[in-house]
Amino acid sequence: MKFYKGIITFFLFLLCPTFVFASSSADIYLSGNSEVKLGEEFSIDVEVRNIVGSNIMSVGGDIVVEDSQCFRFVRLEKVVADANNNRFVYLDMDGTMEDFVFVKAIFQAENQSCSTNINIEGLNYMFTDFSTVTSPVISKTITVANHLEQVSLNPPFSVDSNREVFLSLPDVIGQAYSLRYTTNSNVTDKIDSVWNSSNPNVATIDSNGVLSILGNGETKIQVSVTSKETGRTFTDFFLLHVLVPTTGVQILDQPFSLFLEGNNHSRKLNVLVNPTNTTEAITYSSDKPNVVQVSSDGVVSAVGLGSATITVTSGSFSDTIVVEVNQLVVDIPKYTLNANHQESLSLTAKLLNSSTISGTIEWKSSEPEYAEVSANGVVRALKASSGEPKEVLITATWISNSNPTYREEITSLITIVAPIEDLVLETTKVLLSDQKPTFSLNAIINPSITTDDSTLHYESSNPNVVQVTNEGVLKAVGNGTALVTVTTSNGISQVCEVVVENFSNSVIWLEHFSIVGKNQMAVGEQMTLQLSFQPTHVTEPFEVEYFSSDESIATVDSTGNVVAKKEGFVTITVRINGKEETHQIVIKKVVHPKTGLSSIQASMILVLLSLVGIGFSLFKKYQLL
């Protein structure tokens, strides 16, 4: 059956009286896609090619569709083509170039996998020489195709928005599930499909899409579908999670207490979840996070006083435990006791929140020789250290009655002092003269071991009669009477009356002295230090004292003789009537100038060489000793 969808006739005239044309001819072609997609519009162009002889003056004919089951005729369009696409161009009557007018037939594909012809039948064209040619039936075969464009997996279980599937053991073990996929509708391509599981230990899938569950874990199930016609491949997948469900949750701990401070500030819960290889998450929560906080791995930590319920959940199972938060406190955290009178103090330690636990308190002193503590928390000062207060930590340890290893500690800082309480002068009256121009005033502080500064301050009421050094040495200056006041660092004072008579003021006092001696010595060497006085002729009675800073390196006797013992650095101190000077000495080992050996090293080599009978002669010959 023929359907005449449209008839287009063109009459194109060109008057060229000066030319004579021979017989003319041309060909008609149908151009356009040979394959179209279902549902889309496409066009067939009617083109004139291979023109021989005259220009075309007129074209006319019918466009006929033989079969309408594949596609539907929509409309005809006239198209003016330019010369660049090699279509026919003719001269208009005024001699200008004009584009030839062609016909575009528009169709729409309606059936899948369909192929049929579009014919141009009885098309006539007349040339300017008035010759006429009628074309035969011209056909173009059009095939309607629907290629693969999409693949979607449709597993027999729920897939969430993240393309994830969750299954639980043991029910799915050994089960086989037939998977299917869908494509875009009415695909005409021949296709190949490939199935894949990324973790065959969890699940396998065969070439027919049969899925078998083998164990717990995660795997990616994917299908890849390829069109044999286009070569394009489309994939879809889902993530399969095979879970081991929880069958029970149990907290193995008994209700317990935490402390705001100390070793028991936090604790990890002991939780049993069955089965142990469950894949379901274990979560922890506290109903009072301002009292007890719990981490994601079950560590509970004290935050504030009170109690909180901790819940452990896995799957549909859960268990709870009550955790109490306590604080051990001592009523007097800091105190000072006087060792002079062995003062005492009673301490009390207790829990601020003890509704569910009980225990006993043990006491301990960090320095029991300075302060002791009784089983009831009574602290007593025993003695003080010299020069500075002594700090003693008194520790109260709370011990749980139900679990003696569960303990908490709190400390109280006790400072032991021994202040100066008295000052005694051996004599309160001194007589000075030419025969006795000086006197050492001996002052005794009480107690002898004191935490106060034991330095004494001396002051003369009349320096023109008596002067006094920082060490308490009284010096006659002129006849008369003066009061010397001795004062402790905490303000206790005593007074000594000094009377100077028959004093001619002829005593020459030592103002300064210096030490003269070498600053380097060899091990084994000796040296006597010399003293230089200013003024030179001192008549003041005096006593010289010598001290070594390290007697293992060098010693010094009462005459100033220094003996070098071993390598090192030593300071020699000389003290005269309260005045001090120092002298530094470096002690070096003795090295032979030829061998570079010390005397000890040379002696050892000599012994070794003597064993073979050559040592002594060699050393003597070359003067190595």
Image: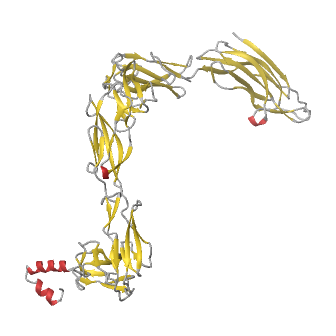
Residue 157: name its quadrant: top left
Q: Is residue 280 above or below residue 485?
A: above
- Image quadrant holding the N terminus, namely top right
Query: Looking at the rendering, in which quadrant would you find the C terminus?
Result: bottom left
The residue drawn where x is 30% and y is 41% is: 378
Q: Is residue 439 above or below residue 488?
A: below
Q: Nearer the viewer, residue 472 or 94?
A: 472
State whether residue 196 appears in this view.
Answer: no
Q: Is residue 158 left or right of residue 595?
A: right
**151, 262: nearer the viewer:** 262
In this rendered view, identify the residue nearer to me: 87 or 387.
Answer: 387
Viewer-nearest residue: 61 or 598: 598
Q: Look at 11% across and 77% down and name the residue there.
A: 608
Residue 529 location (% of width, % of height): 29, 83
297 left or right of 544? right
Vertical side of 200 occupied by 505: above or below: below
Q: On screen, 253 above or below 527?
A: above
- Number of dots carrying numbers: 0
Residue 497 x, y percent position in the rendering = 38, 72
Q: How is the image coloured?
A: secondary structure
Residue 396 picture quarter: top left
Q: Is residue 256 visible?
A: yes
Question: Could you tell me which residue is drawn at 73 percent across and 25 percent down?
Answer: 45
Residue 321 position in % (x across, y down): 36, 23
Q: Is residue 552 left or right of residue 105?
A: left
Task: Give the quadrant of residue 15.
Answer: top right
Q: Residue shown at 73%/17% (left/top)?
A: 74
